[in-house]
């Protein structure tokens, strides 16, 4: 659940909703009733199962960190992302 306040947070809330694994709304528009309703909708077995399906398709954290480090090191060395050394 993303109760967004600023900048990119609505984008991430929309992504969770599109994937069927979460919800989002502006924090300023959140009420006790809407919060309870959102929690009920995302704490279902169906939503949890969908989240597990999505998680299984994601790149594992160690691999993601290594890829990010490689990109940063490449840029620091003057290489453009996506290009091989040559």
Image: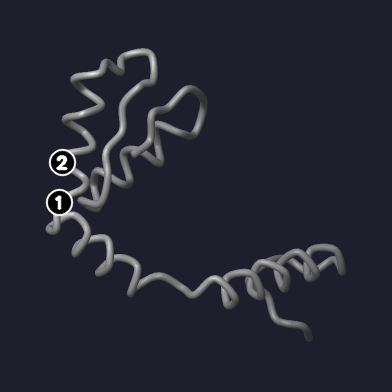
Residue drawn where x is 33% and y is 46% of the image: 15
Closest to the observer, 74 or 40:
40
**Disc 1 element:** loop
User: Which residue corresponds to the image point at 51% horizontal and 24% vertical from the top-left?
Assistant: 6
Q: Residue furthest toward the right?
A: 77
Say the numbered circle drawn on residue 44.
Answer: 1
Image quadrant where residue 3 sits: top left
Image quadrant occupied by the N terminus: top left
- Judge whether 71 appears above or below 15 on screen: below
Left or right: 72 in relation to 54:
right
Query: In the structure shown, which secondary structural element does the residue marked by tag 2 occupy?
Result: helix
* Rendered image: mark on residue 64: none
For the view shown, which residue lies furthest in the bottom direction? 86
Residue found at x 57% / y 71%: 64
Cα distance between the residues tagged 2 and 1 = 6 Å
Q: Quadrant of residue 13?
A: top left
In the displayed structure, does residue 40 sit left or right of residue 78?
left
Q: Of 28 and 7, which appears nearest the observer?
A: 28
Q: At x 38% / y 35%, what residue is drawn?
A: 2
Q: Categorize mark 1 by other alpha carbons within 10 Å: few (<14), some (14-19), many (20+).
A: few
* Dot 2 crowding, Cα within 10 Å, few <14, some 14–19, many 20+: some
Left or right: 17 in relation to 13:
left
Q: Is residue 48 above or below residue 14?
A: below
Give the side of residue 32 with respect to residue 28, left or right.
left
Query: Percent x, y for residue 61?
Result: 54, 71
- Residue 84 at what x, y percent from top left? 70, 81
């Amino acid at each position: 659940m993303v109760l967004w306040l600023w900048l990119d947070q609505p984008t991430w809330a929309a992504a969770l909703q599109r994937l069927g694994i979460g919800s989002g709304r502006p924090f300023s528009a959140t009420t006790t009733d809407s919060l309870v309703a959102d929690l009920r909708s995302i704490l279902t077995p169906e939503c949890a199962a969908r989240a597990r399906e999505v998680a299984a398709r994601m790149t594992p954290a160690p691999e993601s960190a290594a890829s990010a480090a490689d990109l940063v090191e490449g840029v620091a060395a003057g290489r453009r992302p996506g290009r091989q050394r040559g």
